[in-house]
Amino acid sequence: MALNHVAVLVFPGFAPFEFGVLCEVFGMDRSDMGVPVSRFTPVTPEPCLVPTSMGFAMDIADGLDSARDADLICVPAGPWQHVPESALELLRETVSRGGKILSVCSGAFVLGEAGLLDDRDCTTHWMHAEELAQRYPRARVNPDVLYVQDGPVYTSAGTAAGIDAGLYLLRQEYGDAVAGIVARRMVVPPHRDGGQAQYIESPLPPMPESLAPLLSWLHANLSEEITVAEMAHRMWMTPRTFARRFTAETGTTPYKWLLQQRVAAAARLLETTTLSLDEVAAQAGLGDATLMRHHFKTVRGTTPSAYRACFAGFREPA
C-alpha cells in the first residue's frame, strides 16, 4: 500500500516538535527529487485553534472524517487521558481496513487506549515505558529501542526517534533510495543503530577523536575486506578498547555496523542498477550472491531478488 494519504491526529496540548517531525517526513513535497508525494492532513476531533504544549495554538481545519481514507495515521506526543472515543474508533477502523498507525513518544498511550497495543510489541519514551506497561498490561513494551513495528502498528521513542520510525516506514514502502533522499534533505542519518539505552546510561569519557573520519573511510571502502583490528589500528587503539568505544558511540558492534552498511549499499545497487547479484555482492563487500542472500535475509527479512522486484527502477535525479 503506497502512502497516498497521511493524516496526523492531534489533541489539545500536542507537542509541536513531534508534529513537525511528521510534517518533515511525510508532508513535504520532494517530488523534484523523485520522492512520491502524499496528501497530508492534520485532523482533530473538533476543528478549531488547537493549543500546543508550548502555549501557542495551531488552526486545524479538518475533522476526523478527513482521515477516513488515510493510508497512515500518525499520533504525536501529547495528553492522552481524555481522548474522545470517536478518535479511538478512527484508529481501530484504520487498522481494520488495512491502514497503518504510527505513534511518536507518548502518542503510544493513545494507541493503548484504542486497544491497538494489546498483544503487540511497542515502545515509547524511556521515561514513560513503565507507566505504559502498567496501564496496558497486554502490551509488550520494549524501553530499549528507538522504534518498533508489529504488524500495521508502529511506535517510536521520544522526540527525534519519530524521524527514525518515519524513515523506516518510507524505506518499507519505497526502498532505500527514497528514504535516503528524505534523510539527506533533513540532514539526518538514514538509519541509526542502537536503542534508547545509549541515552539513559552514563556515557563513557569522550573519545580523543570522533569516529566520523573512520566511518567515512569505511563507507568508501565497503568492498574491501576490513577487520576490527584494522579499524582499531586506524584509530590508534587496541581492538578491545576500540570495540568498546565504537559500541558506546554507535550503539552497535563494529561487525554489525559494517554489515548494516554493506546490506544498505547492496539495496541501493539492487534498486538503481542492473548489475548481477554476484556483481552487487562484490561491490557491497558481501562476497558472492549466496553469502549476500544470507546476510540480506538476516538484516532485511527478504531476499535480494525479492527486494529488487519490489524497488528496482528508482533513479535519483542528478
Image (spheres, rainbow, N blue to C red):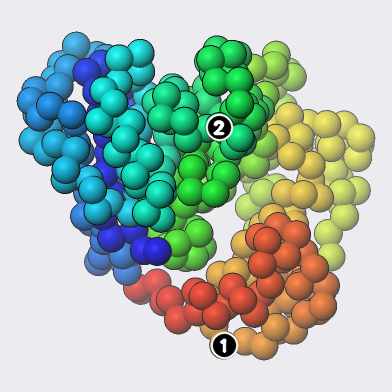
Q: Quadrant of residue 29?
A: bottom left
- The answer to whether residue 189 shows anywhere in this view is yes
Q: Is 152 left, or right, of 212 in this rendering?
A: left
Q: Residues within 10 Å of mark 2 (few under 14, many from 20)?
A: some
Q: Is 14 left, or right, of 137 in this rendering?
A: left
- Please tell me which residue is depicted at 64% across the width and 79% down the height of the picture: 305
Q: Which mark is residue 118?
A: 2
Quarter of the image containing the N terminus? bottom left
- Whether label 1 touches label 2, CB < 8 Å: no
What percent of the width, then of the height, locates residue 170?
44, 55
- Please tell me which residue is depicted at 18% across the width and 29% down the height of the picture: 45
Earlier residue among tags 1 and 2: 2
Label 2: which secondary element: loop
Q: Nearer the viewer, mark 1 or mark 2?
A: 2
For the residue pair 59 and 66, the one nearer the viewer reads as 66
* Amino acid, disc 2: Asp
* Amino acid, disc 1: Thr
The residues tagged by marks 1 and 2 sit, at their Cα atoms, a distance apart of: 44 Å
Q: Residues within 10 Å of mark 1 (few under 14, many from 20)?
A: few
Q: Quadrant of residue 103?
A: top left
Depicted 267 relative to depicted 25: above or below: below
Label 1: which secondary element: loop
What residue sits right under mark 1 in the picture?
A: 274
For the residue pair 33 and 271, the one nearer the viewer reads as 271
- Please tell me which residue is depicted at 40% across the width and 72% down the height of the picture: 316
Q: Is 290 left, or right, of 7 in this rendering?
A: right
Q: Which mark is residue 250?
A: none
